[in-house]
Image (spheres, rainbow, N blue to C red):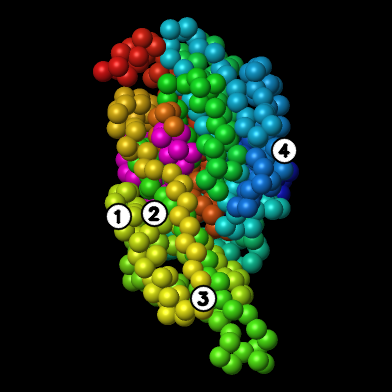
């Protein structure tokens, strides 16, 4: 197994690892996936080299200029593939259309997001391709970062896969550039093979999904699709039609500041009060690290401020709307009790709804999920059904009237410097999109309209 620390070295790495192969190369899910793999990898390596990390304190769309840089790159590549209407708008949204082979077929959307998470360093990504992964610990060259199968069980099943990581000091960007690469690769393949059946495919790449803004300026009417699919999942075969319902809660504490040498009986330290609020929240339940499955949580992710003013930013999640409200009220009661014990302090409590469980909307159109299941099975994969412990653009788009379940893209360990992706699984995602086009090409628009009416 050979690792290449530079995008330009990947071709050399491919030649070298053939000579030193230690395990058999993992098979692809189909000849189609194998045919897409190398062009998909080349695209993916280009995309992750662009810094598209979004900024939570957004003042314009997109929140960072790198997203526009990647958007322009994608427009050029879509034009080169023969998709002439590809365009980047002033808000950072890339849209494109691949016309149907059958004019009676419906219009279907494919969506991925341009930005990467602000939760870990995202600038200067240098991807490494680990050819034919041997199943051992992957020691990355920077910051002592290691990918240990004992701690990352998903790696155990990837022996023989071509694994892509960053260098150890940044995230990789598979969330969601693996999805972007899968869509562009599949669209280019379909554009080059007019004999393959497809509906009209509307493509969109959105900005600022990681800060909950990807759907904010999305023009559903102009997009014109009956449904869409985000390619923003993880493990091979994942198909998800349920997400958390989510809110952000901002707790602000205002104290009384004075020179510490003259503080006796006068100082009210807002930062100490805020720290007490965080410490008083349950630590053995209702936290991301102690919950799983359908359990919700309260997650304080940022504490800032000083003696005069302190702020706790918290995300609250649950699949059940009523339970979500209970979590918010627990946080409110905890903050009120602690700050209320100091009459000179003031508390501000702001709840910002972010998105609702997409299941409320997708359950009304089960055929949208059925079509994705058929496509995944056509690629030789058994669908993995389960809720997302998070959200996608599809959460808000479904609420806005565009049913949008989520399909896998082959990435793992998102939002961390341990992020990685399997080339075999990314290629399977690209091939699944081609299969999805074929499934929808069999449905005429009037059939879809009849199902909606029913």
* Residue at image point 65% right, 92% down: 262
Circle 2: element type: strand
Q: Which mark is residue 323?
A: 1
In the picture of the structure, the residue carrying the numbered disc 4 is 69
State which mark lies toward you, 4 or 1. 1
Q: CA distance from mark 3 to mark 2?
A: 28 Å
State which mark lies toward you, 2 or 4. 2
State which mark lies toward you, 1 or 3. 3
Image marks 2 and 4: residues in contact by CB distance under 8 Å = no
Left or right position of 282 against 214: left
Q: Where in the figure is residue 69, as x and y percent of width and height? A: 72, 38
Asked whether residue 182 appears in the rendered view, the answer is: no
Image marks 4 and 1: residues in contact by CB distance under 8 Å = no
Above or below, 54 relative to 139: above
What range of the chain is rendered magenta? 381-399
State which mark lies toward you, 3 or 2. 3
Q: Where in the figure is residue 275, as x and y percent of width and height? A: 50, 76
Q: Earlier in the sequence, mark 2 or mark 4?
A: 4
Q: Where in the figure is residue 438, as x and y percent of width and height? A: 42, 18
Q: CA distance from mark 2 to mark 1?
A: 9 Å
Which residue, as the protein is rendered here, is positioned at the far top?
103
Q: Earlier in the sequence, mark 2 or mark 1?
A: 2
Q: CA distance from mark 4 to mark 3?
A: 46 Å
Above or below, 86 relative to 119: above
How crowded is the residue under tag 2: few (<14 C-alpha within 10 Å), some, or many (20+)? many
In the picture of the structure, the residue carrying the numbered disc 2 is 317
Image quarter hosting the C terminus: top left
């Amino acid at each position: 197994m050979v690792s290449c620390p530079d995008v330009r070295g990947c071709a050399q790495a491919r030649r070298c690892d053939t000579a030193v192969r230690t395990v058999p190369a993992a098979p692809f899910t189909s000849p189609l996936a194998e045919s897409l793999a190398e062009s998909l990898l080349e695209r993916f390596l280009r995309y992750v080299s662009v810094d598209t990390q979004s900024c939570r304190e957004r003042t314009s769309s997109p929140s960072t200029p790198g997203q526009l840089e990647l958007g322009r790159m994608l427009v050029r590549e879509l034009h080169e593939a023969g998709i002439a209407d590809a365009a980047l708008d002033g808000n950072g949204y890339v849209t494109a259309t691949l016309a149907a082979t059958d004019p009676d077929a419906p219009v279907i959307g494919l969506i991925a997001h341009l930005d990467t998470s602000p939760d870990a360093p995202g600038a200067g990504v240098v991807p490494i391709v680990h050819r034919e992964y041997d199943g051992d610990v992957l020691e990355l060259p920077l910051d002592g970062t290691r990918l240990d199968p004992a701690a990352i069980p998903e790696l155990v099943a990837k022996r023989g896969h071509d694994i892509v990581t960053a260098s150890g000091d940044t995230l990789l960007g598979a969330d969601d550039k693996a999805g972007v690469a899968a869509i562009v690769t599949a669209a280019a393949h379909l554009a080059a093979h007019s004999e393959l059946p497809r509906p009209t495919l509307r493509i969109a790449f959105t900005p600022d999904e990681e800060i909950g803004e990807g759907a904010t300026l999305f023009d559903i009417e102009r997009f014109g699709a009956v449904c869409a699919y985000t390619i923003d999942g993880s493990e091979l075969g994942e198909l998800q039609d349920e997400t958390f319902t989510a809110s952000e809660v901002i707790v602000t504490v205002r104290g009384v500041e004075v020179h510490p040498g003259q503080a006796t009986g006068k100082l009210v330290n807002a930062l100490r009060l805020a720290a007490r609020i965080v410490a008083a929240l349950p630590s053995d339940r209702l936290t991301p690290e102690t919950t799983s499955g359908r359990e919700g949580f309260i997650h304080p992710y940022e504490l800032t401020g000083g003696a005069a003013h302190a702020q706790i930013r918290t995300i609250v999640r649950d699949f059940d709307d009523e339970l979500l409200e209970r979590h918010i009220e627990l946080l409110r009661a905890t903050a009120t009790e602690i700050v209320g014990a100091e009459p000179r302090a003031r508390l501000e409590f702001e709840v910002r709804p972010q998105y609702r469980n997409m299941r409320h909307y997708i359950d009304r159109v089960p055929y949208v999920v059925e079509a994705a299941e058929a496509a995944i099975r056509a690629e030789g994969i058994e669908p993995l059904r389960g809720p997302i412990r998070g959200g996608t653009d599809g959460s808000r788009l479904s609420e806005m009237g565009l049913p949008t379940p989520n399909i896998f893209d082959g990435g793992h360990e998102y939002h961390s410097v341990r992020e990685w992706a399997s080339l075999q699984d990314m290629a399977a995602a690209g091939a699944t999109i081609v299969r999805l086009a074929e499934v929808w090409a069999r449905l005429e628009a009037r059939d879809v309209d009849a199902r909606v009416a029913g």
